[in-house]
Amino acid sequence: MHIAICDDNVADRKQLERLLQRESDKQYGIREPFYIDSYGNAQALMRSPMLYDAFFIDMTASEKNGYEVAMALIHAGVTVPIILCISTINYRDFNLPDNCFFLQKAIRLNELCDMLEMLIVSCDNRVPHIEIRTETDTHYVTENDIMYFTQSAHTLIYLSDGRVLEVNDSLVNFYDGVRNMICFLPISYKAVVNVSYISNMSPFSVRTKDGRKFFLHPAFCKYAHHLMKQYPMKEISSKEQ
C-alpha cells in the first residue's frame, strides 16, 4: 500500500512516519509493506496524487489548509481514502465527501491501527485505475469506462461518457498495460473492444452498443467467441440498437 503524508508540522509528520513504518514492520512477511512518501507542502503532493492508496493530511500554517488540500485531491480525481488529522483545525466541521475520514492528534496507536485496517480492506477491494496520457493531460479511468480503442494514425480511446482520447502510444503498447483485465478483447490488429459493450457478434464482425461495427479478424475469431461465452450478452433494447 502506497501512503502519502502531507503535514506542515515537521514533528507531527516525522512521528506519523515512524508510527506507520513500525506498523509496516509488524506485517513483514504477511502482506505487502507500506510505502510512505512524506510532504511538507501541497504543491509537491499534487505532482503525482494518483500514485497513492491513501493520504494522511493536516495543513494548518500554509497557504492551503488540510480541507483545501483534500478538495484539490478530489478535484484531481482521487477516490481513495483521505484521512484528515485534526489538530488546530476541526475538519469535521467541513462538508467533505464519503472518502474522507478523521484522526485526532495526538495520534493514538490503537486508533491508527483501526484506520490502517480500514485502509487495507479498501486497498484490497479497490477497482484499479488505468492511466491514459494524452499530449496535454493524464486521465485516470476504470476498465468499465473504456468501450473500445482503435489504431489508425494514432491510438484513439473511446470512453462511455462520450470522450475520445488520443494517445501517442501504439495500440499494442496500450493493450499490454491492460491485458490482465480480461474484459478487453482484441478483435483485429487495429481494434480492442470491452466485452461489456458488445451488443452482437457474428463470425466476421462485432457490433458495439453505441452502434459501431468492427471487422473481426480470422486470427482473433476463435478467442473472441471463446471469451464471449464467459460474458453472456444481455438483451439489447431498441434504443441501443
Image (cartoon, rainbow, N blue to C red):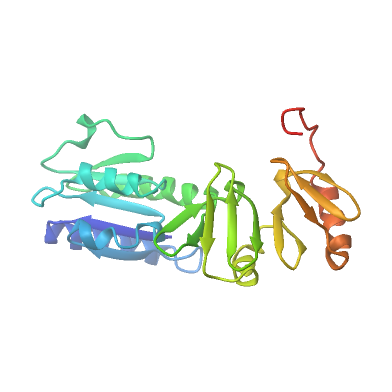
Q: Quadrant of the C terminus?
A: top right
The image quadrant of residue 93 is top left
- Extreme residue in the top direction: 238
Which residue corresponds to the image point at 73% horizontal and 46% vertical from the top-left? 212
Front in this rendered view, residue 123 or 66: 66
Q: Position of residue 166 (x, y in %)?
A: 53, 60
Q: Is residue 183 visible?
A: no
Which residue corresponds to the image point at 26% horizontal and 58% vertical from the top-left? 5
Please determine whether, in this image, residue 181 is positioned above or below residue 101.
below
Q: Position of residue 189 (x, y in %)?
A: 74, 68
Please determine whether, in this image, residue 174 is positioned above or below residue 124.
below
Side (left or right) of 94 relative to 138: left
Which residue corresponds to the image point at 33% horizontal and 40% vertical from the top-left? 100
Number of marks: 0
- Extreme residue in the left direction: 61
- Extreme residue in the front direction: 153
Q: Position of residue 150 (x, y in %)?
A: 66, 60
Side (left or right) of 162 relative to 106: right
Side (left or right) of 68 relative to 225: left
Q: Position of residue 81 (x, y in %)?
A: 38, 46
Side (left or right) of 226 relative to 114: right
